[in-house]
Image: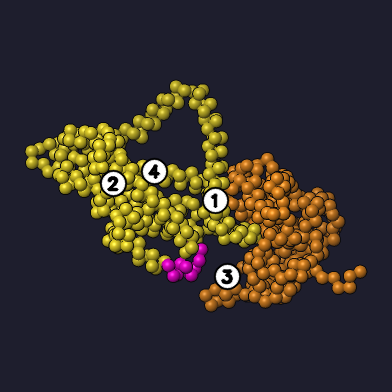
Amino acid sequence: MTYAMKSVETDVAESARPALSLALGAVGRGIRSGLLWLAAKALPPLVTLALILLVWQILCAKPGATLPPPSQIWRDSYDLITQPFFNFGTQDIGLGWRVLVSLETVAYGFGFATIAGILLGALIGQSEWAMRGLDPIFQVLRTVPPLAWLPIALAAFRDSRPSAIFVIFITAIWPILINTAVGIRNIPQDYRNVAAVLRLNPIEFFLKVMLPSAAPYIFTGLRIGIGLAWLAIVAAEMLTGGVGIGFFIWDAWNSSRLSDIIVALAYIGLVGFALDRLVAAVGGLVARGAQAS
Amino acid sequence: MAPIKRPYLKLDRIGKIFERRGVRSEVLRDIDLAIEKGEFVSIIGHSGCGKSTMLNLVAGLTQATTGGVLLENHEVNSPGPERAVVFQNHSLLPWLSVYDNVRLAVDKVFSGKKSRAQRHDWTLHNLELVQMTHAKDKRPSEISGGMKQRVGIARALAMEPKVLLLDEPFGALDALTRAHLQDSLMDIHRTLGNTVIMITHDVDEAVLLSDRIVMMTNGPAATIGELLDVGLPRPRRRLELVSDPTYVAAREAVLKFLYERHAYVEAA
C-alpha cells in the first residue's frame, strides 16, 4: 500500500511537469477550456436545481400549503444557512458544528468497521473453513436493519455515544467485510506462488500481497460502507440525542421548525456526497497501483 | 574419486494423481531423473503432458503422490527461494516498481545476511545482469512483455537459488525478443553456472540452451520417454549452430520423438 501510494505520487509529479509548461504556454486557451469544462459540468445541475426551487416555490407558496416554500426557508433559517459555525451554548450551535459531531461518531464507527471488516474479510477470503463457518452467520446478520441493533447496544453499553458508534460499526462492516473477502479470493494464484517461493510469512503476505491486490475491492466496500454509515448516523442520533445533525432534525420537528429541517437535509446530503467522493478518490489513487498488467 | 556419486537434484520415482470431486486423474507416473550441479535441463512435451506439474513438484508448489524430490539429499516438500521460479506470465506484483519487485525477494532472502546498502547493491546488480537498470523505477504495466520476463529472471537470480526453475519463460514473447532473451539466459548461465530446469515446447530453444533434453510422453500418466544429451560445446552461437551437424541431429531427434512416436492426440 505504501509502495503504491509512493509511486502514485511520483507519477503525479511527473505528469504534472509537462502539464504545467503546456498550461503556461497557452494560458488563454487553458482558461477558456477550463471555463467550458466547468460550464459543461456545473451548469446542468445548477439549472436543474433552479427549476426544482421554482416549482417548489410555486407549489408551496399557495395558502394552506403544508411545507414552507424556499423563500420562507431563507427567511426562517437565515442564520443557519449563512453561518454554519456560530456557537451560543450547548444546543444553540451552527449546523457545521453538528455535522462535525456526527462525523466524529461516524469516524469512530467506520474506523473500527474498516479494521475489523478487512481483517475478518481477509480471514474468510483466505480460509475455506472460516468461510464455511462464518459466512452464513454474516449473511444473516447483515440483513438486520441498523437501528434494530440500537436497543441491544444501549442495553450493553448503557450510554448513547458508544451505542451510536456501535450502530455505525455494525452498519458499515458488512460491505467492507464481504468485498474484502471477494478481493482476497480473487488474488491471482501467481501472486500466491510468488509469495510461497519467497516464503513470505502471513503478516508479510497480508501487507505486501493481500492488501494491495485486494485494494480495489476493499475500496468498493469502504465506499458502500461510508454511505450506509452516514445514513445510519442520522437515524441513530434521532433516537440517542446529543448534539449531532440527526438529533437537530428531531429537535426541530418537536419544535415545529420545518424550515430548519429542510436546511439540515441539505447539509446531510452534501456531506454524504462529499464523503462518498472522498473515499472514491482515495480508492482511485490506491487502486491505480493494483491494476493488473 | 568419489565411490558413489549422489546427484545434486534427484526426482525419485515420482507419481502424481490429482483427485477432484472423486475424479482421479493420473498426471505423472514413474518419473526418475538425476540432474548434476550446473546442468541446464529442458523438459519438452506436448500440452497437458504434466511438464508444469513436474516443475511445480520441484518448486514444492505441489506435492508428489508417490516418490519425492531430493535436492542435495534433502527432501523438497515446500516452496522456497533456493528453488526460484520464473513463471510463464512473469508474475510481477503490479503495484511494485521493477526495483521493488526484485528488492522484495532480496530483502526476504538476505535479511540478516546482508546490510541495507548491500541489499540495494545486490538488487541493482541483478537488474544489471538482465539489462533492466534503466527501467528500475517503472511499474510492470509500463514495460514490455520481454522486459517483464527479464525482471522475473532478475528476481529469481537475486535469490541465489540452488536450482533455477523456468516455466515456459519465453512462451508469450515474439520470436525476436525470445531469441534475445535466450542469448541473455545463456550468458547468465555461463557466468553464474546455475543449475537450471526449463520447460518449453520450442524444439530450437531446448536444443540451443540445454545440456540435456527430457522428452515427455503424452498424458495421462505421462513419463519420461527419452533423454537426449546435447553434445554441443559452449559458448554456443545461434548462427553457427544452424548448420552444425550435432545441432541438426539433436533437433531431428526431438522432432521425431514429438511428432512421430508421440504425436499429440487431440482430445476429441
Q: Is residue A128 magenta?
A: yes
Q: Nearer the viewer, mark 4 or mark 3?
A: 4
User: Which of these two is toward me, A24 or A251?
Assistant: A251
Quadrant in which residue A193 is drawn: bottom right
User: Which of these two is toward me, B191 or B18?
Assistant: B191
Q: Amino acid at mark 1?
A: Ala
Q: Which residue is mark 1?
A: A292
Quadrant in which residue B267 is drawn: bottom right
Q: How far across and down, in percent of the image, does residue A281 sit?
A: 44, 43
Q: How far across and down, in percent of the image, does residue A68 sit?
A: 15, 39
Q: Earlier in the sequence, mark 1 or mark 4?
A: 4
Q: Amino acid at mark 4?
A: Arg
Palette colour of chain B: orange
Quadrant where the N terminus of chain B lies? bottom right
In the rendered structure, which segment of residues is drawn in magenta? A125-134
Q: Amino acid at mark 2?
A: Gly
In the displayed structure, A46 sits above or below B157; it is above
Q: Which residue is mark 3?
A: B268
Q: Amino acid at mark 3?
A: Ala
Dot 2 falls on a residue whose secondary structure is loop
Q: Which chain hosts label 4?
A: A
Palette colour of chain A: yellow
Q: Which residue is mark 2?
A: A244
Q: CA distance from mark 3 to mark 2?
A: 70 Å
Q: Which residue is mark 4?
A: A277
Q: Is residue B102 magenta?
A: no
